[in-house]
Image (tube, coloured by chain):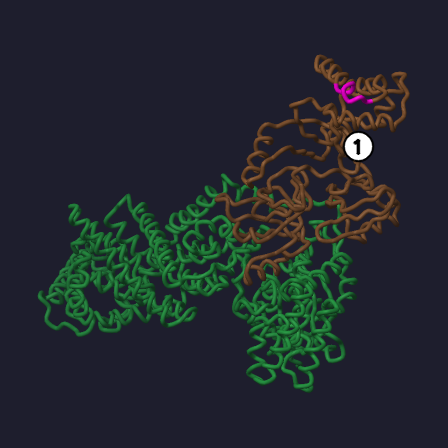
Chain colours: A brown, B green
Amino acid sequence: MNNRHEQEKKQFKQLFQKEGVDAFEKRFKVLDCFLKIEQHVTCREITDQLKIDGNPMDTEFVEETMKFLCRFGFAHMVQFEDGPRRYEHRHLGMHHDHMVCVKCGDILEFKDEVLEKKQAHVAAAYGFHMLQHRMEIYGICSKCLKSRELMMPLCRARQGETCIIKSFSGGRRAQMRLSSMGLRYGDAIEVVSSQGGGQMVVATGDSRFAICHGLAEKILVQHAPPEMDADTPLTHGHGPGRLPGRKISLSDMKQGQEGVIVRVGGEGTLRRRLLEMGINRGTHIYVEKYAPLKDPLEIIVKGYHVSLRVEEAANIMVEDVQSVKHP
Amino acid sequence: MKNVTMALAGNPNSGKTTIFNNLTGARQKVGNWPGVTVEKKEGTLKRDGYHLKIVDLPGTYSLTPFSIEEIAARDFILDEKPDVVVNIIDAANLERSLYLAMQIMELDRPVVFALNMADLARSKGISIDAERLSMLLDVPVIFTVGNRDQGMDELVETAIQAAESFPMGTSGRKVKYNREIESLISELKTVLQENFQGHHPHPVRWTAIKLLESDQVVKKSLEELSPELEKEMTQLAARSRFRLETIFHDDPEIVLTDDRYGFIAGIVKEVVTLSPRKRADMSRNIDLVLTNRFLGFPIFIFFIWAMFQLTFSLGAYPMGWIESGVSFLSGRLDLLLAPGLLKDLFLDGIVAGIGSVIVFLPNILILFFCIALFEDTGYMARTAFLMDRVMHMVGLHGKSFIPMLMGFGCNVPAIMATRSLENRKDRILTILITPFMSCSARLPVYIILAGTFFGSRAGSVIFGLYFTGIVVAIASGRLFRSTLLRGQDAPFVMELPPYRVPMLKSLMIHMWDRSKMFLKKMGGVILVGSIIIWALSTFPRLENYSMDYEGDIERINNQAEIALSGAGGDGSGGMPQEMVAKISELERLRSQEQVEHSFIGGMGRAMEPLFAPLGIDWRSGVALVTGLVAKEVVVSTMGVLYGIGDGESDALKAALKKSGMTPLTALSMMVFVLLYVPCLATIFAIWRETSAGWACFNLLYTTSMAWVASFLLYQGGVILGFG
């Protein structure tokens, strides 16, 4: 790295002198400082760093310099979503893409050969000659993920995030407001939009709610596990732990699991029979066991035992599935 | 004496029949799974100047028009308009029970709630505020414990009171549906009221709701009343349904059901409290073993084996007693009656015929007792649970297993038990193959034949026969399912009731009910059949025998008299053994000749070519034909035809051996008996439950199967050198 930096400095000298750019010494200091910082920096950060190093300069001047540096290929300007302009080293021939953590602002560089090749293929498939590309992935870095296990107030969740309501730190009236909306512990909510200190709009299932900041502060949530997404189709339903918002069919549930019925399907006769046995929307059921031949299965509903075939159970959609010791 | 009609309604397993028994003292079945109480049972009770007619309606979970039990229950309440309907509710299952209760209340008759099995609910920690429930729904509510006969008086008093105060009171608070539905109901009601102007056949609100649900039975009855009105209502209802579908994105029935459950949930919340201390659920623990993944089946097979083992080994003792009893009786009659036609009728026809069958009564009693035990403890439902997968592969239901199991006892109640199957196709299919489950009446034939020709291996041979029956049943089932009876399976959804310690009294009642059917068969069909067969084998009378039997017997008797009077003159001693034997032998030969000469002999000879390829001689052939009357008659006919007049099976065995039968032919005969047409009683039962067409089909199918199977067996055996 250092060699390169030396090289760059030399090149810098040459180019700038050739172009006749003024204030060469000062600009060199900017370059030096920039090269030292191995991060994606903003002008501000460079200015600050210069100050610390004992070289106070105008922000405008630094900006201008950075523009020059970009022009000459020493730096590369990137602007991530809604953020300030950042600059990164442009090591010639070393293209890389970025991952940006929306929580802590960390910027990770990565380069994936397969991805790069794929991009070229795709372009070629469209008869497009790719000159250059830029790819940014926004998400949460591993450090932030680890510290995620803790609960946080809903107001701090980001747009697009899905969280699970874990707890509530408000008074009785606020609690009642929450339950009157139909939001319960364990419900998954997706943050549709959030504005700084104002209202949030969240969605659960098909309903949307506007939650004032005050209430959003009191609702404590946890991030939903990565597989959880209201829109992804479900391929299998076996899993320990709670998976609210996820609908699986009764036939996919295992012995010892319980859940709440969201939908009773099936054709006429079957459906009627299920309903008159008390198996309807909103009912809690517990899977007691499967028969020795794996079919039929026995469930406990409304306090009594019912048996039904696996193919019949497939018509019943259940959510809130979790494993319990006793029904 | 005022007359009051009281109907008992409720879920299956709610203890309704026990209460019915308590009130009426009548004999009833107390089964633990749906379908046992299918017919309406009636009884009477006199109390406080009232004459009560009590009707036990079929147990149902709901009152939809989709099964015969529900329709029967509903129609009774609508058409007969009982003075009061007592809803028997399992106190531990209030929420589900209320689903039926609310529908009953919509029928506008006075209703009383009897929260039954209150003791069990209490032990589960469930406590119900009866007063509050009564207030919320505006119906009288009482607690009862049916199997301890508690609360019966209160029930009757409350019911009478409710009946008396009806014209002034209401029939309880009904479900209030959501605004949309209520407004649609009003619309429909208005049109109905305009047209009927007070003379509506059924409650108007109820009719409106049923039209919204697209109830076909209601539609039809409306059509019969007034086709124009029906058309108008159908249109209006269709529009309303469409509206509901659009608003709620679901079937109107579902929407209504949801509302009902919502209403019920609200009530339950207010009325039921669960105490935090819940005792261990004994039933669940038992099921941990009995429906265990590994132990379930072995235990099940063990129970079935034990049942059959018990039936035969325990039954052997009373069998012996009855045998000696019968021969004693015939011995006495022999001495008492003057020789002649009447004596012959009695001894050779009636006593011989019935004697050879009654000997098997103990077996049958024990078998039915075991089945009653399964039903009353609740294990029967578990058998359906265990066997459904297998049944389903055949194209049947887990619920079909139980009737088929009962077929091992007697086909007649087994066929009646198929009423528990909701789907008509399922029912017909089960009925068609149940006769292949070798019924207990065929057992005497196996015992005699296998006992005679297979000695110590008789047990295995008989087991093999039963097994063959099952295999044929399954194969036929699959065949029918894929050809004649194609269609959807009925839903299997079935309640697994909690295990109960059965009351000995109800077990006995249960066992006796079934055995009664068997005895009736004997008293009726078999008796008549025996007499007919005797007649057919006695006439025309043979005048000239090949030997002078009479003369020979006279001679021996004279010799005996001389010897006795010479020896001491008391005359009370019996004849020496050889002389007795000689006389028996002569008599046997004589009656055999007689029989061969008679009608039945003629029939037998005529049918010989039919049976010859099966290795069955004409006497056995005739016996098989008489088996149409009842399978037990096969043995008694053989008894008659082989010339045994006293029902002793040993004598029959000896005679069989002498007649030229071999193990192979015996086996061929047994297979034929296993498969061919079931007895007349069964045929009539099939006719009643399905149709004449199916009954005939069954007759032809079973008999041809039997013929082919015996043919293959016998010819194959001959080829292989077993002949």
Residue in the foreground of this view, choosing between B159 and A117? A117
Q: Residues within 10 Å of mark 1 (few under 14, many from 20)?
A: some
In percent of width and height, residue B696 lies at: 33, 69
For the residue marked with disc 1, what is the amino acid? Arg
* Position above or below: A257 against A11: below
Secondary structure category for the residue under label 1: strand
Residue drawn 36% across and 52% down? B470
Disc 1 marks which residue? A85
| Residue A39 seen in the current view | yes
Q: Chain of mark 1?
A: A
Q: Nearer the viewer, residue B474 or B615?
A: B474
Residue A69 part of the magenta-drawn span = no
Q: Is residue B120 visible?
A: no
Residue B85 % position (x, y): 66, 71
Question: x%, y% of residue A50?
Answer: 87, 20
Main secondary structure type of the part rendered in magenta: helix
Placement of B170 over or under B499, stated as above or below:
below
Which region of the structure is painted magenta? A15-21
The residue located at (65%, 39%) in the rendering is A227
In front here: A206 or B647?
Answer: A206
- Image quadrant holding the N terminus of chain B, namely bottom right
For this rendering, which residue is in front, A251 or B425?
A: A251
Residue ID at (85%, 25%) = A62
B660 displayed left or right of A312: left
Position of B713 compared to B481: left or right?
left
Q: Residue A47: x and y, percent?
A: 86, 24
Numbered disc total: 1
